[in-house]
Amino acid sequence: MSGEGWLDEAAIFDTLAATDAPHRAFLRSAWFADAPVRFAARRGDGSPLAAFALVERRKGPLVLREVGGSYWPFRGVPVAPGIVPEDLAQALAADASYLGHAWRLGPAEAGDPALDTLVAAARLAGWHVLTRPLGTVFVLDLAVLTASGDWPSAKTQRKNRWRKRRLEEEGGALHTEVFTGRDWTAGQRDAMAAIEAASWLGTLADGGDTKFRDPEMRAYWESLCSDPVLAAMLFGSMMWIGEVPAAFTFGVEAGGVRYYIANNYDERFTNFGPGRVLLYEDFARAAEAGVTTISWGLGDAGYKSEMGAQAGPQMVDLLFVRGRIPAAVLRHWWERPA
């Protein structure tokens, strides 16, 4: 059902995101700029229970609808507070044609209460839920680390001071720019694209998964700044060495959680760790601003755990399939480590 009689489409997404769990507050209408198919699952009185923004993609032999939005930090469906699976199941059954015989949601955080409610409702409404493991997110518990009083360690702080001296000897005076989506400039985005081109991603034949060098991805992030609420959630920082952009961080912050979507650095400075220096500065600013958790993406390349990160939530990729036989056929193909 679309939005007639209650709120317009964008307002439904924005209202649900604002009343959902705080760490999911970025799931606003503008976040789903890539998703042309939208509907709200509703109670009998017309009030929305959940809002779906869908794209069509090919996955192996299937062409299926899937929840849109940025791949990171996760994909999600904004939901009303206090909903129960039985009510949402009834609404999903009434709107089953939007979702079809198979639809996908992922990556998603296993164990998230909103996700658990959605999965339980989908099962009640007749879908079988197939789960593909994607890996473990690494997180920094800033609240605990900063309360300990010895993070970063004295040794790490000395090392970072040494890194800064060597970087300045290498290329000139260091300075850092900090921005949100409200004051993020085209020049800064150009510099971030230049860093991506000069990073390890720039050596990949397919161009790598770049956020600002890729014109379509850059346009997506720029589009989010038109929503003032989302613009305030976007954050980033960039280190310059002399006149050269050397490293950047970028992500979205919601409910005391900073989700890092990208951080990268120019390979020419790799011996002196500009990316690591910038991240430590970023984490210090985040802690001062009251951020309690850094969500740092899948896996640990070594430097994450060295900087204090630990294994956090499991990420999963969910396929919802109608019919026992189709679900059985697809299970072996889907339920394998990615």
Image (cartoon, grey):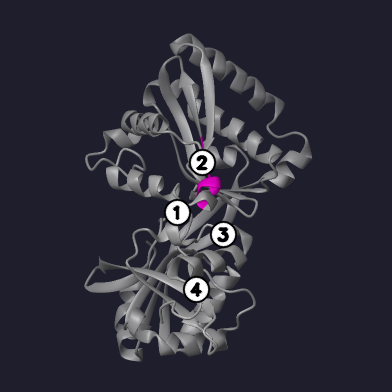
Q: In front here: 105 or 234?
A: 234
Residue at image location 49% in from the left, 90% down from the top? 90
Q: Nearer the viewer, mark 4 or mark 3?
A: 4
Of discs 3 and 1, which sits in the foreground?
3
Q: Which of marks 1 and 4 is in front?
A: 4
Checking the image for residue 25, the label placed there is 3
Residue identified by numbered label 2: 182
Distance from label 1 to label 4 (Cα)?
28 Å
Q: Does the magenta stretch include residue 57?
A: no
Image disc number at residue 72: 1
Q: Is 337 rendered above or below residue 284?
A: below
Q: Earlier in the sequence, mark 4 or mark 3?
A: 4
Determine the secondary structure under disc 4: loop
| Marks 3 and 1 close (CB-CB < 8 Å) | no
Give x and y (percent) for residue 304.
Answer: 55, 41
Within the magenta stretch, is there residue 235?
yes
Upstream in the sequence, badge 3 or badge 1?
3
Ranked by sequence position, the earlier of labels 3 and 2 is 3
- Residue 246 in percent (x, y) is at 43, 24
- Residue at the spot of label 4: 7
